[in-house]
Image (cartoon, coloured by chain):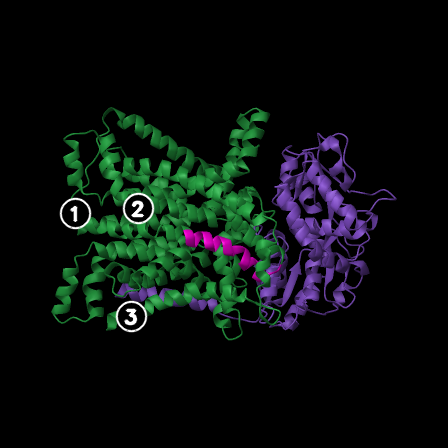
Amino acid sequence: MTERITISGAALLLVLIGLSPVMAMVANTFYGDGGFSLGAYRILWSADGQLASLMGRSMLLSLLTAGLATALGVPLGILLGKSNLPFRGPLMALFAVPLLIPPYVFAVAWFGVLGKTGWLGQALAPDAAGFVSSAFFGLFGCVFVLVAAFMPIVMLLTVTYLKAVNPRWEDAARLVSGWARILVAVTLPPIAPAIMFATVLVLLLTLGEVGVPTYLRYPAYAAQTLTQFAAFYDFRAATVSAAPLLFVTFAILALQYRLHGTVLELGRGATGAPCVEIDLGKWRLPLFALVLGMALVTVVLPMAVLIVQSASPAVYLEAISRAGDSILRSLGFAAIGATLLTVIGFFCGYLIAYRTLAIWRGVDWLALLLFTLPGTVIGIGLISLWNTSLTNWVYATPAILILGYLAQYAILPIRMTSASLEMIPRSMEQAARLSGAGWFMTLQHITVPLARRGLIAAWLIGFVFCLRDLGISMIVYPPGSDTLPVRIFTLMANGTPNLIAALCVILVAITILPLGAAAVWLNINARHL
Amino acid sequence: MNTMRIIMSALAVLTLGACSREPDVVVYVSHDQVFSEPILQDFERDTGIKVRAVYDTEESKSTGAMNRLIAERNNPQADVYWANEPIRAEVLRQQGISAPYLSPSAEGIPAEFRDPEGYWTGFAARARVLIVNQNTNPMPTSVLSYNDPRWRGQTVIANPLFGTTTTQIAALFVLWGDERARAFMASLRDNSVELSGSNGDSADLVARGEFAFSLVDSDDAVNRMRQGEPVEMVYPDQGADEIGCLIVPNAAVLIAGSPHPDLGKRLIDYLLSRETEAKLALSDAAQIPLHPGVAGPSELRPISSIRTMRINYAEIAAKLREIQPFLESWLASST
């Protein structure tokens, strides 16, 4: 009974925190002229096809990004997760770096390479430099930056789910066939739903992305939502203009519904036997050079641009004086957000892993939907719901930011906890219960210690995503309490490129250093066990 | 368990720290943070009053703070709005969000840059100028140069849905009438004028030689000149029979029903002072002082020697709302 009440409470909390702002915002669109009104929806059919055109551009950007991210991420995932390529661990960590950083930071960095006066621009003839710069500011630039930013999702999910493939099937296939054919006929088909899930995730994240298309001047639909919010001072119109985006998100998620279920099932059949490794033979070093080159171009080069641009103690001193308080606040808010995300994520993940209640799939689906909604939409929803004199204690304090983080990022600890719990034999918990332990005692002494590594990883990922959040933060941050990503964005207006580069480097450092420290600590702990 | 206690204690301290309150004034700022923050820090130092600010982001095109003010109208959080142009202040007045306050510091500021009832007061202005790449020959002299076929595909303008570019377009609609202004906008499209994300982007594109000229704010032009970029600044339409140069002052606005109106008035007095205008003039913000006798940036002419556009900001605010659907439609057909 305690178990069901606690888990129901966690699920209800997620609904209240995540769904209620969106519902409040939607409900508000039906109110106008003192009563019920559909007036705000007129913009959908009076826009002369503009919205359809914008949606078309967004879909084109999303499809290209998702397609290329998959085309690159799957082979990379196979090489890094299943072959004898040298330095697989460090390479995987390097490729994952863009996932930890707001995509617009990479757009800023790439501008220093591909802009007319950037590194490449200076090396090329003026006409060629102009051509590259023009191509960067538009669809091609957006696709390039977003593929680098989101490709790690496909790569990491491929690596993860390759471990769920039964190695005995591959061993049997190796008796009669080479690896190329085995991959196509044996290894990839079972994890195709997971790859498709990763592709859909990239597609939806690109669809909701605002920062990169805005910076690179590509007219995307999510930016239209912001335009309605920003230029017309009309919240109802802003919400209504976001409705097609919500519809498309719903439709894509619904189409993926069956695959989604299969993805959740994948880990359950894992044998626990070691993964069969592909011997690359004579291709080992050429492929290593190729992968290393790719990492250098997509990750190291843009980071190097930022470091070179900001390489002066005076610039860093100015950055600290300009944004020191924002850095501390970001760390504090991210730590609180990650802790609460881990707690809610644990109970909701428990629900999904053990299917304690019939609503488990609904909870997972809701969290995924919230993750794919543009942060600006959730931000507007939070204002609609919480900006009252009775709820000032939430709205006028950093609590509003934390609520936003919980709404948008709950899926991450939920999925990670769920995956960790799948690895723990249910019999251990059952044995504790038969010995008379209550549910909480069982959690405290059996489940949580066994899932500890997964929970720490969930906290870290929650921390990273809260730290890099921009969409929600820039809409609802309380007066005098901005975060570092918001500060970077506000200082971009007439701030010097050196200062912006230094702040971006600081953001990257405070994101990666805790992860590095945690990785070292977990390794040391693992050796002692 | 000790680790858990330490974590929970740290979280409690962080939460309480973040939520702590002391007498303060809340200001929403649409002027660039890099320039406005030092002024607010000076105010804190000079008065001992803590300032809590919300700054606009470049992404929200300086309308994020404005939208928050409108969203919060039934439960105001801000005491003062530092608008980067008077049109937003006019919109707030029309929506009943601002309160009147005639500051003693406003004495000497020309009447054309103030609301007569005190719903907003202008200070520290920018001029809308043409930033021109030095390789351009001949130099453009008017906003009508955008229509000149010799510069087809060589000019850029910031997105007209946002910021001072919207104000400029609305001002042309007021001055010329709808028909002529719409024809002008159509000619921009026909002459392949490129759109940029902001005035700053436009200035960079001209400085890098990607375009010949662009209509930008004077601070954008002055900054590129100070950075040694190969650009020049042209005050448009200075001929005797021409429309003149649009002046866009900052505006200080007291918010109706604000939590700390007295502290808000003190901040407004400070913003409108000659000292603040002098600081904004001599900083990289390069604003033009409106108080007579205050020294301005060396690159800019004093306000008295510019042929300014004769316009009524309230009229422009009304026109701006009226032409928004047209601008959106124009934008869609131009991208």
Residue B231 % position (x, y): 69, 36
A202 or B73: nearer the viewer: A202
Can you see residue A325?
no
Please report the residue visible at 70 percent of the width from the left and 66 percent of the height from the top.
B93
- Residue drawn at 32 percent across, 35 percent down: A75
The local secondary structure at tag 3 comes to helix
Indicate the position of residue B23 as horizontal and vertical percent values.
57, 71
Task: Identify the residue under disc 2.
Answer: A194
Quarter of the figure with the N terminus of chain A:
bottom left
Mark positioned earlier in the residue sequence (2 or 3): 3
Q: State left or right for residue A468 relative to residue A126.
A: left
Mark nearer the N terminus (1 vs 3):
3
Asked whether B66 or A43 is in front, the reply is: A43
- Residue at left offset 64%, top offset 63%: B81
Q: Tell me the magenta residue range.
A: A233-251
- The residue marked by circle 1 belongs to what chain? A
Which residue is label 3 attached to?
Answer: A6
Q: Subunit of mark 3?
A: A
User: Is residue A236 within the magenta segment?
Assistant: yes
